[in-house]
Amino acid sequence: MKEEVYYGRGMKRVKEKYPDLYEGINKLNEAIYTGKKLDYKTQKLVAIGIVASKCDESATKKQMSSGMAELGITEDEIVDVLRVVLLTAGMPAFNKGMRILEEITAI
Amino acid sequence: MKEEVYYGRGMKRVKEKYPDLYEGINKLNEAIYTGKKLDYKTQKLVAIGIVASKCDESATKKQMSSGMAELGITEDEIVDVLRVVLLTAGMPAFNKGMRILEEITAI
Amino acid sequence: MKEEVYYGRGMKRVKEKYPDLYEGINKLNEAIYTGKKLDYKTQKLVAIGIVASKCDESATKKQMSSGMAELGITEDEIVDVLRVVLLTAGMPAFNKGMRILEEITAI
Amino acid sequence: MKEEVYYGRGMKRVKEKYPDLYEGINKLNEAIYTGKKLDYKTQKLVAIGIVASKCDESATKKQMSSGMAELGITEDEIVDVLRVVLLTAGMPAFNKGMRILEEITAI
Amino acid sequence: MKEEVYYGRGMKRVKEKYPDLYEGINKLNEAIYTGKKLDYKTQKLVAIGIVASKCDESATKKQMSSGMAELGITEDEIVDVLRVVLLTAGMPAFNKGMRILEEITAI
Amino acid sequence: MKEEVYYGRGMKRVKEKYPDLYEGINKLNEAIYTGKKLDYKTQKLVAIGIVASKCDESATKKQMSSGMAELGITEDEIVDVLRVVLLTAGMPAFNKGMRILEEITAI
């Protein structure tokens, strides 16, 4: 995944102050998206599903936003991910995901 | 999702003793997989990612098994989902997912 | 559960844009609160306990508010739920629940 | 809650080897079930809902078993708790709860 | 742990309105930090790791702040805890922890 | 962390079939335990606390076992970690941790 897509604000600090750790995260990141069968978009949809199922608001927002901006994931596709979130993680996670999606697409 | 795919052992009891609840779950289930953009296989991959990220052993086993048996999801594709699990949920969830996958494919 | 009680902001969008999914959620919802032994208030107390134990701030606020406004659940009763949250989910979940309750009842 | 109800196997060791900690847990336990508005059975139903929503198999089994044996909670009442678990935590947690309930009541 | 360190805003209310519960929490708290082998600072580092791995923002902030202010825990030491969080709970938890640490140390 | 300490059974398969991913995990692992202030034992105690707070049985067993076998962590020190687990994650997580510790030390 590209740095801007996955990395949050905190990563800038890691890069500057803890270059070894930053390097390790980068190596892992590369390996995660190298030599694989699924395309990047499908993996991103999985990532959106996972963070949304955890009710992690900021991570969900970041994943949705970058998925839409950089991979052309549509609102309907994210709703289809949230359908699975509803079934596997319940209404509160689904509700939160829908609200975040609404905020992102309202902009 | 087909009944056999998603429903666990406990659902037989729900069907017999709590038909209203069973009906409600079915209706939801239909709605979740109706009129949508993503194909069923992609949604299944999302479901595998979510349950694996929760370290839910029996649900992970069930989702992986049914995904491979009924939708032709391959071992490599599940590993690609587990790569995302590693990044978003850490090593213990990844390890558990790899071990379950190993047990399933060893049969 | 009544629509206003359980459904969050995101549900309006679901109703308009994804009527099938909305219908499925409604059917499930009905089944969950039909033909049962426990009264609605007890189920609501269980719901408050579950979302508070997950440290889900917005869901906890919504469940507490609607439980107090529509079912006459008292502050002391919610504290009794939070006692169980303390024992089963620890201090951070309990602390967060107490703070949310304080904010709601301060209004 | 009575010692046999809430405490698991590990607590015997705590009692023998870490009496201070054991005492602290007891004091907390007393406070949690003293001077409150909700009856013990309702709090137990909340506890069952919380541990079931976390997919914690052994804790769910223990809570359900002791609730049925000591407080006369019925199978139908536990199903009503699991309905709330379904709505707030999803199908995997509901499925697991139903399976555990089936195992307990099959004995 | 000292009251100011561990207890959040909600605890003042508990103290005033539910003295029995407050007393029980205090007794537990004492037992947790009495007659033990690990020093207080190490236990605090464990606590920071646990709440950060749960993505609990307010608890993480509180634990980090009090650990730095009262026990002299340094920024580098918290980063070392977050390294473990990264490995055991994934990037979103690590990212959130780094961002919170940045906010605290920016003041 | 040494390979035997942290890596579970599933990792052998990763090494053979997905060498790129294996390499990435190794690089991250190195970075996590390089150039840091906290000693390895303290980080291990944090790891035990995190997996125990998630009620992840197999990961908790693995972390405790390797910590005792390779780093000389004592039973009492693990109990001190579990005290923090009790406070931050509740009785079910504490109970499970105590039972696992009992099983390990009974051997």
Image (spheres, coloured by chain):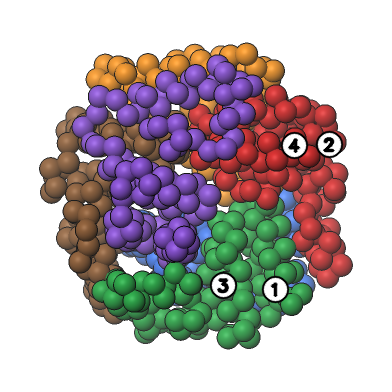
Chain colours: A blue, B green, C brown, D purple, E orange, F red
Q: Which residue occupies 29% across, 42% down?
A: D41
Residue C82 at x, y percent in the picture: 33, 35
Would you identify the image quadrant in which residue C77 lies?
A: top left
Instruction: Report if the CB atoms under discs 3 and 2 are less than 8 Å apart.
Output: no
Read off the chain for label 4: F
Read off the chain for label 3: B
Read off the chain for label 1: B
Q: Which residue occupies 30% across, 71% down?
A: B18
Tell me the CA gap for discs 4 and 2. Answer: 14 Å
Q: Which residue occupies 44% across, 69% down?
A: B10
Residue, disc 3: B63
Q: Amino acid at mark 4?
A: Ala
Query: From the viewer's perspective, is E13 left or right of D52?
Result: left
Query: From the viewer's perspective, is C7 left or right of F62?
Result: left
Q: Nearer the viewer, mark 3 or mark 2?
A: 2
- SS at mark 1? helix
Q: Nearer the viewer, mark 4 or mark 1?
A: 4
- SS at mark 3? helix
| Closer to the camera in the image, D55 or F25 | D55
Residue, disc 4: F106
Are the residues under badges 4 and 1 in a single subunit? no
Residue, disc 2: F69
- SS at mark 4? helix
Neighbours of disc 4 within 10 Å: few (<14), some (14-19), many (20+) = few
Would you identify the image quadrant in which residue B72 lies?
A: bottom right
Indicate whether D28 appears above or below F10.
Answer: above
Are the residues under badges 4 and 3 in a single subunit? no
